[in-house]
Amino acid sequence: MIIWEKIQAHCLKHGDEFAIIGELEQYTWAQLAKVIGIVQQQLSQTEHDVIALYTDNSPAWVIVDIACQLSDCTLLPLPSFFSQQQLEHAISQAGATAIIHQMNDELTSFINLSDNKMVAINSIGLILQEVNNKDASLPPGTNKITFTSGSTGQPKGVCLSSQQQVKVAESLLQATQLIRPKHLSILPFSTLLENIGGIYAPLLSGGSIVAMSQESLGFNGSSGFDLAKLLTTISHYQPNSMILLPELLLALLSAIKSGWSVPSSLQFIAVGGSKVSAGLLTFAQQAGLPVYEGYGLSECCSVVSLNCPDDQSLGSVGKPLNHVDISIEEGEIVIRGSAFLGYINDPDSWNKDKVYTGDLGYFDEQQYLHINGRKKNLLISSFGRNINPEWVESELLSNGLLKQCVVFGDARPFCTALIYPLNQHETDDRLQSWIDTVNTTLPEYAQIKKWYRLQAPLSFDQKLLTSNGRPIRATIANQYSTIIDQLYQG
């Protein structure tokens, strides 16, 4: 297994240097190799085919991940942001017969765990408990199951091989040209992008991982987000790389405006999850943030294209990585070379050679890939004009004045928007002035004629956003239907 071979090689060269830095514990390369070997032996003895993992970012998460690969069992990372219903669905669908988690966490209140078959995982503070479950039908070679964060209540289980995961991580290293980076993991490890880019890529290159809990990074669940904590963590650990969602990028830009100094150690910040405007990226780079937009999806084992320091075009999502071939078929982005093994319990989806992404896009003359938005989200006005709402939204979000924006206009005479400002004390006049400015850059049929100021931001907890911050448009349209209708009256 390539990652294990690399870890052993790094032990010989850098055995006393830190590979993983946690809040309470740190592991040198030599210590990491030793503890992975111990946990691997223990997991092999349990003889479970599919094991779920439910815990916060920590060195223990990384250890279990690598140990599962070594013991030839399938790992099911469980996102902490999943609802109880989604967690139960994922565990059941994947056929997991054991769960590795912390003692007395929230899982114990609703998952039927066997107390009689509880095993402490050696020296990493987690336990393994068996759960009654039926076997699932998985494609041969499945090493990891990641559940998509899509707009449906019951996400799909995407099956991936260990070779695919390593291939993507190696392509990322080649594209970014990062050498032994110190990576600060901000997104949950259960997020495939962070799993591949924040664990595998640093480990393969001999770098180090700063694995802090979500609370220490400022994510306080339903109580909000503490930006000061995140800034303190970034400044303290002086990382070389990070991965951000657009909303976190906005938060860092707000901090810079308030006087926060960007650490000179930062070399590469990947941003993705939803479309980011060229204006916002330009502003971020001018402010000292080395931000580069990319594009990927779970069905292709995460990243397929990326802008890089020596090869970038703002407004695009970069050029295809070396492990994939990307084409455009009837306006839709189609990817070959990194297709997933298939969905759980869906043999008709197995062993396909290409992935139809459902995203609209095109290549420019320099072969940079551009995303126009989701095929299913395309708005067609009552005058027959095709409008990509993500395009209009990204322009409205480009200067950091707005935190959220959702555009409507399907089968309507003009476009409207629900907006929420980054600063809740922002005046309506200033918001209107900004919308007027953006409208001058848009064709008449895509301009925002009317808008409504949300009283509170849209949230994942309300099931109005996916886990990576994309609006769940149908649900939002339904919940705010009266308000939207009123925008069109008269």
Image (cartoon, helix red, strand yellow):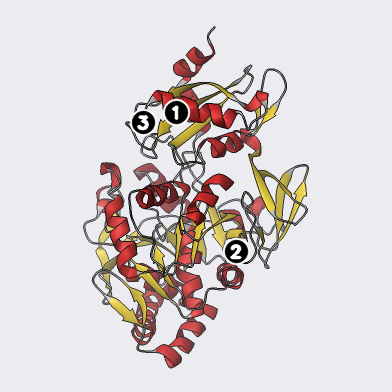
Identify residue type, mark 3.
Answer: Glu
Q: Position of residue 317 (x, y in %)?
A: 62, 53
The secondary element bearing badge 1 is classed as: helix
Q: Position of residue 187 (x, y in %)?
A: 41, 57
* Residue shown at 39% from the left, 52% from the top: 252
Identify residue type, mark 2.
Answer: Cys
Instruction: Check disc 3 and report the residue beneath it.
Output: 426
Q: Residues within 10 Å of mark 2 (few under 14, many from 20)?
A: many
Vertical comparison of 478 with 345: above or below: above
Instruction: Check disc 2 and report the residue beneath it.
Output: 308
Q: CA distance from mark 2 to mark 3?
A: 35 Å
Residue 393: name its quadrant. Answer: top right
- Residue 431 marker: 1
Q: Position of residue 7 (x, y in %)?
A: 46, 83
Q: CA distance from mark 2 to mark 1?
A: 33 Å
Asked if disc 1 and disc 3 are in contact, CB closer than 8 Å, the reply is yes
* Residue shown at 44% from the left, 28% from the top: 431
The secondary element bearing badge 2 is classed as: loop
> Which comes sooner in the sequence, label 2 or label 1?
2
Report whether residue 268 is seen: yes
Look at the image and tell me in which quarter the C terminus lies. Answer: top right
Vertical comparison of 338 with 282: above or below: below
Identify residue type, mark 1.
Answer: Leu
Vertical comparison of 266 with 223: above or below: below
Q: Residue furthest bottom?
A: 12
Q: Could you tell whether 244 is left or right of 281 in the image?
A: left
Vertical comparison of 471 with 310: above or below: above
Report whether residue 214 is seen: no
